[in-house]
Image: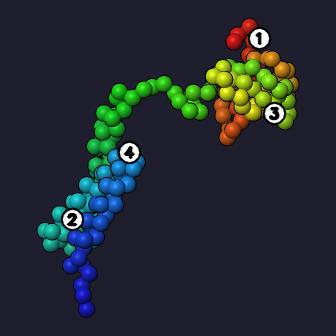
Amino acid sequence: MVDLTNYLWIAWLVVILVCVIIELLSLEFTFLMLAFGSLGGLAAELLGMPWWLQIIIASVLAVLLILTIRPLLLRVMRRDADPTPSNVAALIGLRGRVLSSIGDLGGLVKLANGETWTARLDPGMPPLVIAIDEHVTVTRIEGSTAIVVPTERNIV
């Protein structure tokens, strides 16, 4: 019968390769740290250590790298990042004009960026109907619906 522990180095290489491929797709440094931990497991295998010790070494090394090196790498990578909100985050606080009155069933709003969204009144507001051409402010986005509150008419 073949002893599979003689071929653990192949398993370590496969784990390292898979982690590196996933890291190239995610770019969050988590799988890179797991790959380096697995590299420690491979080194333990090449030094002839038992399989359970290889797993412990790989796990401890990966956790230490995730807790120490990964935050530093993320900080360096994001140092020059653009702080401007984008996507849904950019819509929060945006003002708009009501196109179809907003009542219990919702309505339509044209936002300042030119997009038209379905809209509902923020649940924290007392029940009311916002008439056409009134101005609103987006407080949050739920799915494809803008949750809005009324703003003063003179603020655009």
Q: Which circle's residue, 3 or 1, is located before the other in the chain?
A: 3
Residue matched to label 2: 42
Distance of label 4 from label 2 (alpha carbons):
23 Å
Distance of label 3 from label 1 (alpha carbons):
20 Å
Rate crowding at label 4 as few (under 14), some (14 to 19) or many (20 or more) other CA atoms within 10 Å. some
Which amino acid is tagged 2? Answer: Leu
- Above or below, 19 relative to 131: below
Which amino acid is tagged 3? Answer: Gly
Rate crowding at label 2 as few (under 14), some (14 to 19) or many (20 or more) other CA atoms within 10 Å. many
Which amino acid is tagged 1? Answer: Arg
Distance of label 4 from label 3 (alpha carbons):
39 Å
Residue 39 at x, y percent in the picture: 23, 59
Asked whether the residues under the numbered discs 1 and 2 touch, taking CB atoms below 8 Å apart as contact, a structural biologist would say no
Distance of label 2 from label 3 (alpha carbons):
60 Å
Residue 86 at x, y percent in the picture: 53, 30
Q: Secondary structure at mark 1?
A: loop
Rate crowding at label 1 as few (under 14), some (14 to 19) or many (20 or more) other CA atoms within 10 Å. few
Residue 97's quadrant in the figure?
top right
Residue 93's quadrant in the figure?
top right
Residue matched to label 4: 28
- Above or below, 98 relative to 88: above
Q: From the viewer's perspective, is the residue at label 1 or at label 2 nearer?
A: 1
Q: Could one spot residue 70 in this view of the protein?
A: yes
Which residue lies at the image location 24% right of the left edge and 87% below the top edge? 2
Which residue lies at the image location 34% right of the left edge and 29% below the top edge? 79
Asked whether the residues under the numbered discs 2 and 3 touch, taking CB atoms below 8 Å apart as contact, a structural biologist would say no
Which amino acid is tagged 4? Answer: Glu
Q: Is residue 3 left or right of residue 19?
A: left
Q: Which mark is residue 153?
A: 1
Residue matched to label 3: 106
75 or 13: nearer the eye? Answer: 13
